[in-house]
Image (tube, rainbow, N blue to C red):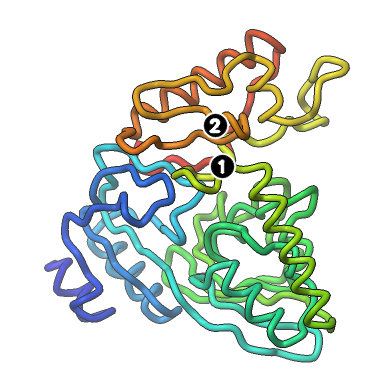
């Protein structure tokens, strides 16, 4: 099979790239090339790419807004499908449908401008709708899955199917997509009505909170570790149930490996000072994990997703 020709026929020639650098498409700004990078825009294109990959016996990796991921310096083998861009439509008085490639910020702006309430507190969330669904994004104790009515997915057999929220296996930082490797195409959210001015005020408050507590001015992937789970972890008495606080109290805030650094602003953020490699970042992640384990007996689990390792 001529993979490049088949992909170009499925999604248009100018959206298929061979040996394409992936670093520019990530918020960490690191990582090597994809064998093939395909820019997909809709369900039909995603399903077609999955079919081509299956016939060619090639792995498929999905990339959305590029946050919450670390791409290996050697890149990613097979086909990387970048799902970016899309629309929002009203389904009913209390539901809206957003394409997976739409940014969360784009979705929030769309709802606020129309006096639609429910998503305004997610202002400033990095990444796309699909990425947020895949990892069940959280903010200040809330999970985005709590707002989801249904999700449309493409299976690894190229079938497009709807899933009710109850089928999504939503949990802290997880969904069924991590188990099945299905690809989110769109999501329906439950919404209400609100005053535009009030919704904007809530969004501004969320943005201000992020600016105070996160190193938004630096290249990072968001939180590196999940917060400890009370069901399985044993955090020492008096210690916060916070991965960032544990890294901080283990003395790692500001620590470096090459050009990667634990943010002085937030211990659960690693930032790229400009020339970091994925290897620098991975070493620093493991150093933080080891220090917290040694100091407090807590084994921090990854929130970040590793691609190509």
- In the rendered view, does 57 fall on the left or right side of 300? left
Q: Which mark is residue 215?
A: 1
Residue drawn at x 39%, y 35% as measured from the top left: 273
Residue drawn 29% across the image and 67% down it: 38
Q: Position of residue 83 (x, y in %)?
A: 42, 68
The outermost residue toward the top is 294
Alpha-carbon span between mark 2 and mark 1 = 7 Å
Determine the image quadrant of residue 12: bottom left
Name the image quarter holding the N terminus. bottom left
For residue 70, which numbered disc appears in the image? none
Q: Which residue is mark 2?
A: 263
The tally of labels here is 2
61 vs 177, left or right, is left
Residue 301 x/y as whole percent: 61, 30
Q: Residues within 10 Å of mark 2 (few under 14, many from 20)?
A: many
Seen from the viewer's position, the closer of residues 47 and 231 is 231
Do the numbered discs 2 and 1 sit on residues whose CB atoms are within 8 Å? yes
Q: Secondary structure at mark 2?
A: loop
Label 1: few (<14), some (14–19) or many (≥20) C-alpha neighbours in 10 Å: some
Q: Position of residue 214 (x, y in %)?
A: 62, 43
Q: Residue at x 49, y 64 (%)?
A: 183
Rendering coords of residue 93 (x, y %): 80, 90
Q: Quadrant of residue 295?
A: top right
Helix, strand or loop under label 1: loop
Give the residue displayed 73% in from the left and 58% down from the top: 206
């Amino acid at each position: 099979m001529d993979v490049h020709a088949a992909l170009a026929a499925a999604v248009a020639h100018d959206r298929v790239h061979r040996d394409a650098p992936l670093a520019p498409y990530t918020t960490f700004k690191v990582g090597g090339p994809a064998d093939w990078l395909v820019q997909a825009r809709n369900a039909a294109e995603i399903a077609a790419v999955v079919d081509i990959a299956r016939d060619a016996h090639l792995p498929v990796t999905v990339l959305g807004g590029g946050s919450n991921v670390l791409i290996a310096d050697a890149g990613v083998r097979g086909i990387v499908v970048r799902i970016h861009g899309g629309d929002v439509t009203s389904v009913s008085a209390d539901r809206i449908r957003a394409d997976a490639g739409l940014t969360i910020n784009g979705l929030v702006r769309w709802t606020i401008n129309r006096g639609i309430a429910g998503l305004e507190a997610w202002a400033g969330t990095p990444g796309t709708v699909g990425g947020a669904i895949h990892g069940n994004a959280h903010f200040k104790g809330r999970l985005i899955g709590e707002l989801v009515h249904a999700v449309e997915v493409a299976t690894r057999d190229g079938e497009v199917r709807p899933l009710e929220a109850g089928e999504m296996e939503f949990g802290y930082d997880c969904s069924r997509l991590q188990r099945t490797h299905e690809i989110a195409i769109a999501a329906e959210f439950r919404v209400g009505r609100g005053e535009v001015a009030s919704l904007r005020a809530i969004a501004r408050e969320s943005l201000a909170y992020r600016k105070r507590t996160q190193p938004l001015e630096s290249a990072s992937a968001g939180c590196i570790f999940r917060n400890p789970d009370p069901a399985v972890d044993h955090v020492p008495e008096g210690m916060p149930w916070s991965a960032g606080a544990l890294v901080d109290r283990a003395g790692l805030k500001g620590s470096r490996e090459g050009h990667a650094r634990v943010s002085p602003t937030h211990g659960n953020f690693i930032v790229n000072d400009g020339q970091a490699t994925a290897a620098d970042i991975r070493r620093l992640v493991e150093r933080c994990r080891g220090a917290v384990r040694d100091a407090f007996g807590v084994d921090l689990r990854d929130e970040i997703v590793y691609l190509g390792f």
